[in-house]
Image (cartoon, helix red, strand yellow):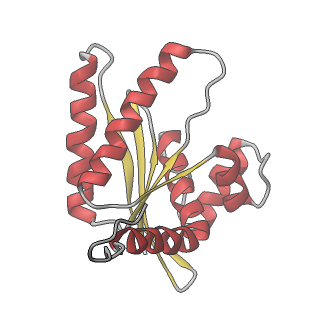
Amino acid sequence: MRIIGIDPGYAIVGYGIVEYRASRFTTVDYGAITTPAGMEFPQRLERIYAELSELISRYKPEAMAVEKLFFTTNQKTAIDVAQARGVILLCATQAGVPCFEYTPLQVKQAVVGYGKAIKVQVMDMTRRLLNLKEVPKPDDTADALAIAICHAHAGPSLLTMQRLKEAEAQIQPKPVRGKRIY
């Protein structure tokens, strides 16, 4: 399964693309989509959409894993990140890529085996699982790879459930002639 992990933001969107086959990871690509601070916010969102569309078109992921938002203090930042996140989810949906969301706790549990692991532990374990020489920079990129790893561990069952729901939605009840079913 080819997975694109996304650490959402509006200044930096970390992405990491991994292949997960036979319980083995192969790193395909990783990096960050960046937007300059002086750029108007709608243009920042447009750039995120355009660059992510290009990545999806180039690498053809089978799933997108995105970190769920968790903010306790700065509401303005939370709203702006939520808007960028919406653009990210829209981009994947329009490309036909199923989206899955994970909390930071779920990512830590899947990568390190401990939901309260510290960031350094998650980053180092990500490096080890992907057989990388160093932890990818910026941190958003390492986080995106960790989110992709999380989906690889949890996603197959989620993907199966989503496909079952989609199949059920395709099945329409056949109306009985002359009778209405309420």
Which residue is at a point 73% across and 57% down the rendered structure image? 109
Q: Nearer the viewer, residue 115 or 29?
A: 115
Which residue is at a point 65% across and 44% down the rendered structure image? 104
* Residue at the front extreme of this rendering: 178
Q: Position of residue 139 (x, y in %)?
A: 53, 40
Q: Position of residue 17 (x, y in %)?
A: 40, 61
Q: Is residue 126 visible?
A: yes
**Left or right of residue 110, residue 61 in this image:** left
Q: Nearer the viewer, residue 150 or 68?
A: 68
Q: Quadrant of residue 157?
A: bottom right
Q: Quadrant of residue 167?
A: bottom left
Which residue is at a point 54% across and 74% down the rendered structure image? 156
- Quarter of the picture containing the C terminus is bottom left
Q: Position of residue 57 (x, y in %)?
A: 20, 60
Q: How many numbered discs sit on the rendered protein? A: 0
Which residue is at a point 37% across and 37% down the rendered structure image? 86
Q: Nearer the viewer, residue 103 or 44?
A: 103
- Quarter of the picture containing the N terminus is bottom left
